[in-house]
Image: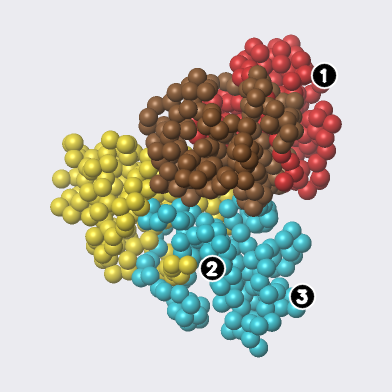
Chain colours: A yellow, B cyan, C brown, D red
Amino acid sequence: MTRENITIRPITTEDRGAWERLWQAYLVFYKSSIEADQTDRTWQRLNDVEFNLHGLLAIDGDEVVGMTHYLFHPSSWTDLPYCYLQDLYVDEPRRSQGIARALIDAVVQAARSHPAQRVYWLTQEDNSTARLLYDKVASPTGFVQYRIAPL
Amino acid sequence: MTRENITIRPITTEDRGAWERLWQAYLVFYKSSIEADQTDRTWQRLNDVEFNLHGLLAIDGDEVVGMTHYLFHPSSWTDLPYCYLQDLYVDEPRRSQGIARALIDAVVQAARSHPAQRVYWLTQEDNSTARLLYDKVASPTGFVQYRIAPL
Amino acid sequence: MTRENITIRPITTEDRGAWERLWQAYLVFYKSSIEADQTDRTWQRLNDVEFNLHGLLAIDGDEVVGMTHYLFHPSSWTDLPYCYLQDLYVDEPRRSQGIARALIDAVVQAARSHPAQRVYWLTQEDNSTARLLYDKVASPTGFVQYRIAPL
Amino acid sequence: MTRENITIRPITTEDRGAWERLWQAYLVFYKSSIEADQTDRTWQRLNDVEFNLHGLLAIDGDEVVGMTHYLFHPSSWTDLPYCYLQDLYVDEPRRSQGIARALIDAVVQAARSHPAQRVYWLTQEDNSTARLLYDKVASPTGFVQYRIAPL
């Protein structure tokens, strides 16, 4: 199966159930959980055209099989902003079928028409499955992340 | 010498010369250069209270010895935004005197009063000098960065 | 009765019922109505710390008796942004008790600490009751509004 | 002469001289003046793609004959933001030739593709010349403005 059958489209308010299933599976993958009111808030932000958080779904037939969230922020290095692809998830049984790649491609398209200067994302150093794909579609930058949280 | 002599304060329009010296040294460290009009633009953004790009300088006596830039962006995971510390530089002869740490502490303070949920930054995996400090003041997240650019 | 008994505080997620009662009465005053999903969206925006729409309530004892919404936008004329007080409503039986004035004062305080350069609002030319108050607390600018809508 | 000869296009960094001549004439019309550093700041904002302040010029041949500035802000009443046309000016000898109308039309186009829900502006109640035009292209809303400034 190839990604030719996959459609990528923006999240709409009709997609709550399908989106939440993927969102929760994604959080489980990261051994995380967030409170119900934050899930509500993220959902509202994704559906508010005026909020700087955007979501795309991957659809196969009438089944939602993947999702991604992205946002824009300025940079001291460039005129145009950067596009940060914050979240990406594909249903486990649907991995290795080009769905993640189709989602990334669609974010690149959205960033290009924003316009933004780049798309970037972060992944766990030891997530070798994901990195097999990322090494094909993008350049590892050699940068690692540090964090101070909570404040 | 300790950082007790160091003052951290916001960039003002008076600081152009001192800031640009550090900015250019920082770019050289990254084997990068950017065009003069982008340096102008970044300077204007840093000095525009309405623009989401902020700068701090480290001062020793009347000498400017370090700088940092930071910005805020929303997150799908949290109510409060994230604070991205994008740039950090300390004059080479003034390294290991607590100046970088004082700059990071000041960004944490600014992020706390914004308020933001976290401060994060990226550094080159092989920058072992910087990572000695970062491992003390922050947590490595195990995340590495990928990038598609330019679009 | 004076406004000494009145407390002004930010809207919280607990206030939905009280807020919606005032919001609907306000819309009726303007012979308007908006769809339920827009009321939901406005409510979510008011409660999202990252969204540029803020709300205050006037409380008397445990009764919510007034509300106001405000937002910030840049200006070509000033460094600091303007604060636009978009909506203001006080329960009809509670008019002329200083409640509207207390709400405006609280928006001025919020704008001052934002910081913003000014607070402004619009009112119907023939709303003589409201203008009696507005002429006391603010300056009429002599500007009238034109609109092209919908696009 | 009609506006068929008039081209409307975004401000670029090449236009500083022409823009500043119109901006100063506009300020004189309002019996106002602003400090040189605010004019610099407004110019930088107009030319920063990431800043919420946009400018258009009206060109006749190689002569710049009019200008307008606009920005977007959210609204509690609508999903889409409002577009506020803050400044509009046409060279005095070039009035009544359709230039102001062409500038307003171009802001409406920009707002439509943003997308925004409406375009609005404010004008002095006694500016009967301007209002002759505005009454043709837009609807007076019957709203007058109040202001508290400076804070």
Whether residue C41 is visible here, answered yes or no, is no
Residue occupied by mark 1: D93
Cβ atoms at labels 2 and 1 below 8 Å apart: no
Whether residue C129 is visible here, answered yes or no, is yes
Q: Earlier in the sequence, mark 3 or mark 2?
A: 3
Tell me which amino acid carries mark 2: Val
Q: Chain of mark 2?
A: B
Residue occupied by mark 3: B62
Q: Compute the Cα span from label 2 to label 1.
A: 56 Å
Mark 1: secondary structure: helix
Question: In the drawing, does residue C95 fall left or right of residue B134?
Answer: right
Q: Chain of mark 3?
A: B
Q: Compute the Cα span from label 3 to label 1.
A: 54 Å
Q: Chain of mark 1?
A: D
**Residue B34 percent across, percent down from the top left:** 61, 58
Q: Is residue A36 above or below residue C97?
A: below
**Residue A63 percent across, percent down from the top left:** 18, 40
